[in-house]
Each structure stands twice: as structure tokens, then as C-alpha cells.
């Protein structure tokens, strides 16, 4: 490829495992990658440029050199790659960021007198973090309860020094929430041990602390030391209050982290649940805009790297025995080995296959999907981002004005039947849901259906009615490629309309085709304009699917309601359980009888009646 002057000769590239770096003219590292075979991996970058993804093309055009380092094993390559990603922070590597600022409960264990406090800063040296917590009030309430049992210093350094000079403790000591190391009511070594116990309880949520206190309370009661027994009782109540707020999700007291992933072509989100002692002790969400194509397993590898790489060399970081992920990274064995070396004992990456762990993994994935949707909605709601997007679309599509009104159309059907067309409307980059429309169609191919929908919609422009449906769009966006573009152009031509721009957005590479050229337009990856177009396209697809399912459900309902003995309530149960006539016909009488309100005889009669359905 002549335009890449830095391309090395294939024979020069070793076939060993190693790590490579693409570097720009300012010696900035653009991308760090690892390979089992450096020659095989690097030559994949130097094929025909038009065969590469657009984002990879941009990275290569910005690069001026590629360097590599040979290592002995794939594990060494993994370690070096993780180290260099942290050191150089390359712009084309995936770096997830928190989707919000989370509060953490922290203990400054490196200090002579450890302090328990709440912070949103994860980069303090010598501090052990617990969480994150979703709400600041929750972590404050938790710390307040725990200090009754583990009265660790929680004041700032200035307050501590002032109390030490005055030899007079603060109010927290008087109310039993500090053991007052400032005036030597507790030895420093004993106070540090108390801080370790606090950290141990927070990280594990271990109910054995409560059981130990109950034993001590009973002993004090038998010795008729009722004041001490009452103190233990209060401590038990405080710990139980903290434990009650942590949902028990796994009966086997599992210590594990669960990672869920949701993504589309432009963005990805992960959710992480920290489970300790079978309880959810923390949860967080992270998002990223994808610069280069990444598989799910690659994204999982990057998030593991980011979460579990210590912020500083030698800094302790909490790593559980098991990390459950939606799909195993290709280097899962090496990653498990790396995690084990950091933990000091065995830690491994697994996929939750069955049982309550699989159920929790599904919940985490749902949270990841929610994080992705929230991130996209938040980004769409940003006025400056929308303005930039509309201006970018105008420039790239060579429109005379920014497309303040965009209408997007999509077609949905099930195996050629129940065809429905959808129209969604965005004005100033925001959805106008009261102007959405759906179109019921006869069974036909997608392009003919699209033509019919547009002709029906454009008819209102020809008649110049005063209703909102007659508003003229600046841009008509279609889910599809060149065939859909041609069908849309024919509809506009037949309607005699020439001043509306057509653009189709194809899913595979997010290529845009317009009426002006058969050559695709590729918007910059993670640009505001592509993000907005994708959001509109996805909304039209969602609306079409919803309308098609409703139409199909209504058809099934009317068919079943004709059968004797079936009312609306039972029909709803059948639709919810089986979804279609085909699946219902395949069901046994026992399956149908298992639904509420169905007797065995009624189920058998229904099975017989369904046999007459074609």
C-alpha cells in the first residue's frame, strides 16, 4: 500500500508473540496491540486500504511508524500490552469511562492513624476503596452505622491535629463513633487493627461478625454484665441494619464480580456488580465511544484491564476469586494468570452457565443495556451536541440548510407477512412522538413496501394540508442501502418533489447513500452527526417492530377468540406463553393445562380444535 510509507517489509516482521505500537509524527502512541504472531497480525493492517474499516483507515493515515517488541509468551504479551495502555493512554485503544461520578467508602490504610471517609476520587495513594455506591446518602448512612461498631477515626487531618494539640477529642468520640486515637484512648496498633476489621466487614459483608457479637452478648448477659451486653446488642443491630441493605442474591456466599456488556456500532456500556458473601456490595456503569471495530471478547478484555490494573505499581486492588463475563476473551487463560498474580491467589474468568449465577449475569446485562440507553439519551439531549450534529449532516450531505426536521422510515414484517411501515419524526435533533405514524401494508418486498409508504406520506405534502403531517421534512432517512435509496428516489420523483434530500443508512458499516452518488459517505466514527443518524434509524426500527408485533398479536387474538370456551383473559395468557399459532399448535395439552384457569379437559379440547387450523 504505497500511501503508507512506513510499511515494513513482511520478511522483517517476526513471527514471535509480541506487542506493537502505531506512532504518529509527534511520537505519540496511537494504538497498542498484542499478537500471538506479530507478522500475521501486522500484515492484516497493510492490505488494500478500501478493505479496512473506516476507523482503521483513519488510524493508519495518522500513523508515521509502527514498532514492535518481541516477548517469550502470550502471557508476557498480555502484561506488556496492559502496561503500555496504562502508560501511553493511546487514543485508539478502548478506554471505558464511568457513566457518572460514584461515591466510594475509603480507608487510608497507609496512614499511621487510618481514616474512614467518603470520596469520589479514585486516585488517592495508599487508600483502600469499597463500592462504588449508587447514592451518596446510602454510603453516608452505611458509614454512620458502621462507626458505631468499628469506631475508626473519620475526621480530617486538620481536626485530628487540633484535637491532639488540645488533648481533647471531638464530639464523635463522646457519642461512641470514634475511639479517639488523638488522645491515646486506643493504641495506634489497636486502632489500625480496628480499621482492618472495618475493611474486612465492608468487603465481605460477613455475617460471622454478627454471630461473634451475639456470642459475646450472651456471655455478658450470663455474667450479669448487662451494660456490656446492651452495647453488644446495639452493635448487632447496627451491623444487621447495614447487611439488610445488601440484597442476598447468591446462597453460597459467593465472592465474585459480574460484568455485563451492551453495545451497538458506535458505543458500548458495561455494568459491574461486586458480590461479596453472596450480597451485592457495589455496582457501577461505564461507557465508551468505539473508535475501532471491536469484538465483544476484546471489549471484555479491555474492561478487565481497566478495572483491575492497580492505579500505581504495588498499589493493592481488590480482585475476587471469580469474574463472570458474558463471553470469554480469546486470552482468558493468560488473563486469569495475570489476575491471579495480582491477587496473590487463584482468580479466574468464567461465563455463568446456569442457576442463580446465570440469572444474576442476565440482570447485570440488563443494567448494561440501560446504561447504554441512558448514555445515548443524555448525549442526544445535549443542545450543543445536537447543533453540531445537524451542522455536520448539512455539510457532509451538501444540503442548503441544516435538517431541522428529519423523517425516518423503516419496514418490518414476519416472514413476508404482517408488513408494517413506520415513520418517526425528529425536530432539532429530538423525537416528536406525537407525529409518529405507522402504515399497514399488504405482503410485498421491502423496496415496494417502502415506495408505497413514501407515496402515502408524500401525498400530504402535495395536498398542502394544515395539519402537522403536512410539515415538509428537510431530510428523509431510510434504514437500508442502495435499493432502498432507489425506491425512495422513485417515490419523490413520482410525487414531483425535488427539494427533499434522501439518505439511507446501512447497518453493516454505517454507510450513507444519497440521491447524489452511488459512492457511500462514511461519517467519522463517534461523530455527533453519525450518532444522531443512528439514533433516528434505531428509533424507526424500534417503532416498526413494535407496530408489527402489535398487528401480529391482534391477528392471533381475533383468531383464538373465535374458539368456544376462550375469553379475552385466557387468550392473553396463551399469547403471552406461546406468541404464535404455530407454537401454540406445537404445544401439548399438559403445557396448556399448566396455565392458570385451564383444566386438563379444556386443554385437550383446545389441542383438538387447533388441528383444524391451516
Image (tube, helix red, strand yellow):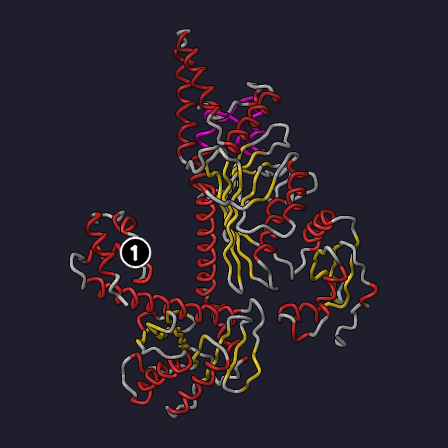
Splitting the image into 4 quarters, where does residue 47 fall?
Answer: bottom right
Does 156 lie within the magenta span? yes
The relative height of residue 379 versus residue 200 in the rendered view (above or below) is below
Residue at the extreme top:
223
| Disc 1 crowd, CA 10 A, few/some/many (<14, 14-19, 20+) | few
Quadrant assignment for the C terminus: bottom left
Residue 318 versus residue 180 in the image, above or below: below
Identify residue for label 1: 576
Q: Is residue 560 left or right of residue 540?
A: left
Q: Which residues are magenta?
A: 144-171
Number of numbered markers = 1
Which quarter of the rendering shows the N terminus?
bottom right
Q: Is residue 261 left or right of residue 587?
A: right
Is the stretch drawn in magenta largely helix, strand or loop? helix
Identity of the residue drawn at 45% across and 61% down: 378
On the image, the x and y values in percent for residue 90 come to 67, 58
In-front residue for pair 202/415: 415
For the residue pair 169 and 249, the one nearer the viewer reads as 249
Q: Nearer the viewer, residue 416 or 3?
A: 416
The relative height of residue 149 versus residue 389 in the rendered view (above or below) is: above
| Residue 165 seen from this side | no
Whether residue 559 is visible to the viewer of this picture, yes or no, is yes
Q: Is residue 383 magenta?
A: no
Amino acid at each position: 500500500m504505497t500511501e503508507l510509507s512506513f510499511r515494513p517489509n513482511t520478511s522483517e516482521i517476526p513471527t514471535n508473540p509480541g506487542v506493537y505500537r502505531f506512532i504518529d509524527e509527534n511520537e505519540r502512541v496511537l494504538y497498542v496491540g498484542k499478537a500471538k504472531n506479530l507478522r500475521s497480525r501486522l500484515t492484516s493492517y497493510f492490505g488494500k486500504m478500501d478493505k479496512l474499516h473506516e476507523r482503521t483507515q483513519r488510524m493508519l493515515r495518522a500513523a508515521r511508524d509502527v514498532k514492535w517488541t518481541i516477548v517469550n509468551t502470550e502471557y508476557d504479551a498480555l502484561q506488556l500490552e496492559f502496561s503500555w495502555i496504562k502508560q501511553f493512554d493511546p487514543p485508539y485503544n478502548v478506554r471505558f469511562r464511568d457513566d457518572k461520578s460514584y461515591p466510594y467508602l475509603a480507608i487510608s490504610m497507609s496512614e499511621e492513624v487510618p481514616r474512614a471517609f467518603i470520596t469520589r476520587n479514585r486516585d488517592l495513594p495508599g487508600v483502600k476503596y469499597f463500592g462504588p455506591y449508587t447514592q451518596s446518602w446510602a454510603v453516608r448512612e452505611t458509614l454512620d452505622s458502621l462507626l458505631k461498631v468499628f469506631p475508626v477515626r473519620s475526621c480530617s487531618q486538620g481536626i485530628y491535629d487540633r484535637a491532639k494539640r488540645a488533648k481533647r477529642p471531638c464530639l464523635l468520640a463522646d457519642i461512641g463513633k470514634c475511639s479517639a486515637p488523638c488522645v491515646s484512648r486506643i493504641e495506634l496498633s489497636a486502632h489500625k487493627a480496628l480499621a482492618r476489621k472495618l475493611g474486612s466487614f465492608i468487603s465481605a459483608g460477613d455475617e460471622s461478625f454478627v454471630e461473634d457479637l451475639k456470642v459475646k452478648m450472651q456471655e455478658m448477659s450470663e455474667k450479669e454484665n448487662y451494660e456490656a451486653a446492651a452495647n453488644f446488642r446495639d452493635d448487632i443491630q447496627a451491623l444487621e441494619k447495614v447487611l439488610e441493605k445488601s440484597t442476598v442474591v447468591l446462597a453460597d456466599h459467593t465472592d465474585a464480580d459480574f460484568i455485563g456488556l451492551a453495545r451497538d456500532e458506535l458505543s458500548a456500556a458495561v455494568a459491574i456488580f461486586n458480590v461479596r458473601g453472596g450480597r451485592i456490595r457495589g455496582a457501577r456503569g461505564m461507557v465508551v465511544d468505539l473508535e475501532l471495530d471491536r469484538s465483544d471478547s476484546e471489549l471484555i478484555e479491555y474492561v478487565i484491564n481497566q478495572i483491575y490494573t492497580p492505579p500505581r505499581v504495588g498499589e493493592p486492588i481488590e480482585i475476587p476469586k471469580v469474574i463472570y463475563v458474558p463471553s470469554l476473551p480469546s486470552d482468558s487463560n493468560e488473563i486469569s494468570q495475570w489476575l491471579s498474580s495480582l491477587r496473590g491467589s487463584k482468580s479466574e474468568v468464567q461465563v455463568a452457565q446456569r442457576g442463580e449465577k446465570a440469572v444474576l449475569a442476565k440482570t447485570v446485562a440488563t443494567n448494561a443495556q440501560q446504561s447504554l440507553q441512558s448514555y445515548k439519551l443524555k448525549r442526544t439531549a445535549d443542545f450543543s451536541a445536537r447543533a453540531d450534529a445537524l451542522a455536520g449532516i448539512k455539510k457532509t450531505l451538501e444540503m442548503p440548510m441544516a435538517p431541522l426536521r428529519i423523517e425516518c422510515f423503516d419496514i418490518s414484517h414476519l416472514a413476508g407477512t404482517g408488513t408494517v411501515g413506520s415513520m418517526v419524526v425528529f425536530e432539532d435533533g429530538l423525537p416528536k412522538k406525537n407525529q409518529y405514524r405507522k402504515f399497514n401494508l399488504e405482503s410485498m418486498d421491502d423496496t415496494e413496501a417502502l415506495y408505497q409508504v413514501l407515496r402515502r406520506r408524500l401525498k400530504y405534502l402535495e395536498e398542502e394540508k394544515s395539519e402537522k403531517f403536512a410539515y415538509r421534512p428537510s431530510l428523509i432517512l431510510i434504514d437500508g442501502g442502495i435499493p432502498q435509496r432507489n425506491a425512495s428516489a422513485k417515490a419523490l420523483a413520482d410525487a414531483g418533489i425535488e427539494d427533499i434530500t434522501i439518505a439511507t443508512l446501512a447497518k453493516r458499516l454505517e454507510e450513507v447513500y444519497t440521491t447524489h452518488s452511488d459512492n457511500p459517505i462514511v461519517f467519522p466514527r463517534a461523530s455527533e452527526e453519525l450518532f444522531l443518524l443512528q439514533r433516528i434509524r434505531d428509533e424507526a426500527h424500534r417503532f416498526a417492530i413494535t407496530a408489527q408485533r402489535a398487528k401480529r398479536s391482534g391477528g392471533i387474538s381475533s383468531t383464538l377468540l373465535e374458539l368456544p370456551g376462550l375469553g379475552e383473559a385466557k387468550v392473553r395468557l396463551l399469547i403471552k406463553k406461546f406468541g404464535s399459532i404455530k407454537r401454540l399448535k406445537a404445544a401439548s395439552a399438559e403445557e396448556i393445562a399448566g396455565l392458570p384457569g385451564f383444566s386438563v379437559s379444556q386443554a385437550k379440547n383446545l389441542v383438538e380444535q387447533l388441528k383444524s387450523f391451516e
